[in-house]
Image (cartoon, rainbow, N blue to C red):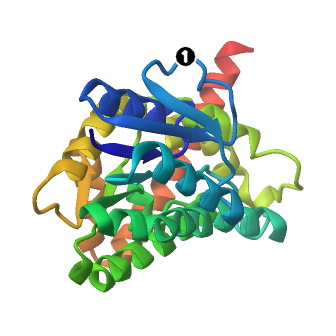
């Protein structure tokens, strides 16, 4: 039986991924820092894990070696979004964003490489289109995704001779609780009036949630499973047409990209103000 570790498995993409692998007959270790949502993942081995705790990660891999005899795939999905204009964000918020999304992801994968090499396994990094395209108000999150994508690209080349595949899965918007959870991180620091449009666009939900452009967590989970089981996986898997369209904007001239982002933020902010006025 093949074995997979899925981090960030209590909700959204991670939860759907754990279920996808379990339904395909894999032995699944589903972990999250939050125990809520892990309890009803039938057919999965569940436990809490803070991906910034290297010692805990090491103990988990020893458990997997003892119980399962090896490991075939790591799905590094744990992470969160710290929204807000960079000038306003306290330094500790940015540091925490990188500690979880970058160091946590990299540490989870590198600690598992000895097990993966034994079986010729794979590491799948759940990234985002923000790993290549930037949106105002999402600088900390986009910076963390840019960083982990660069590291994953380097790691893929470094471990290629050791029969381990490293690949990235990059959705744009996903129909999960991501937007609501990110709203929680949008409070607790002082807001500058100059960024009113950015805050209004973020709080409106469309910037983070995507509305009709969002794909389902199951769609992302299916792509992750395909990447993990491909004989020769691609370096990156955009998920759905919206992700491909967002990534295609990278080829536009930079002034055009910047103008498009500014206009989009103003439009979303205006729509949110209109919506707020109607509901009052």
Label 1 CA crowd tier, 10 Å (few <14, some 14–19, many 20+)? few
The x and y percentages for residue 121 are 28, 60
Give residue 269's quadrant in the image.
top right
Residue 20, image quadrant: top left
Q: Position of residue 274 (x, y in %)?
A: 61, 27
Q: What's the residue at 70%, 63% (across, down)?
A: 55
Residue drawn 32% across and 37% down? 221
Instruction: Answer left or right for 115 relative to 250.
Output: right
The x and y percentages for residue 133 are 40, 65
Can residue 190 be spotted in the picture? yes
Residue 168 position (above or below residue 196):
below
Per the image, label 1 sits on a secondary structure element best described as loop
Q: Give the side of residue 228 with respect to residue 143, left or right.
A: left
Residue at image position (27%, 69%) is 164
Q: Is residue 112 toward the left or the right of residue 154 in the image?
A: right
Which of these two is toward me, 118 or 188? 118
Front in this rendered view, residue 142 or 114: 114
User: Taking 92 as reference, is 108 left or right?
Assistant: left
**Residue 226 sits above or below residue 82 on the image:** above
Asked if one can make out residue 203 in the rendered structure from this viewpoint, the answer is no
Q: Which percent across, then down, holds residue 31?
A: 57, 40
The residue lying toward the viewer, choosing from 119 and 172, is 119
């Amino acid at each position: 039986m093949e074995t997979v570790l899925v981090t960030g498995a209590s909700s959204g993409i991670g939860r759907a991924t754990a279920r996808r692998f379990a339904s395909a007959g894999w032995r699944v270790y589903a972990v999250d820092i939050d125990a809520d949502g892990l309890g009803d993942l039938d057919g999965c081995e569940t436990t809490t894990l803070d991906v910034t705790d290297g010692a805990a990660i090491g103990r988990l891999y020893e458990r997997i070696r003892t119980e399962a005899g090896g490991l075939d795939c790591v799905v590094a999905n744990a992470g969160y979004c710290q929204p807000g204009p960079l000038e306003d964000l306290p330094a500790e918020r940015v540091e925490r964003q990188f500690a979880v999304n970058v160091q946590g992801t990299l540490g989870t994968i590198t600690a598992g490489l000895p097990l993966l090499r034994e079986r010729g396994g794979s590491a799948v990094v759940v990234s985002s289109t923000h790993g290549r395209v930037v949106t105002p108000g999402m600088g900390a999150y986009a910076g963390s995704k840019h960083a982990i994508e660069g590291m994953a690209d380097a790691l893929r080349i470094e471990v290629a001779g050791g029969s381990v595949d490293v690949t990235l899965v990059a959705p744009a918007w996903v129909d999960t609780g991501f937007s609501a959870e990110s709203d929680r991180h949008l409070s607790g620091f002082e807001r500058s009036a100059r960024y009113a449009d950015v805050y209004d666009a973020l709080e409106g939900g469309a910037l983070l949630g995507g509305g009709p452009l969002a794909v389902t967590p199951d769609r992302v989970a299916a792509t992750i499973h395909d990447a993990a089981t491909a004989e020769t996986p691609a370096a990156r898997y955009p998920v759905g047409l919206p992700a491909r369209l967002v990534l295609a904007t990278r080829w536009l001239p930079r002034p055009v990209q910047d103008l498009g982002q500014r206009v989009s933020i103003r439009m979303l902010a205006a729509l949110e103000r209109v919506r707020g006025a109607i509901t009052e």
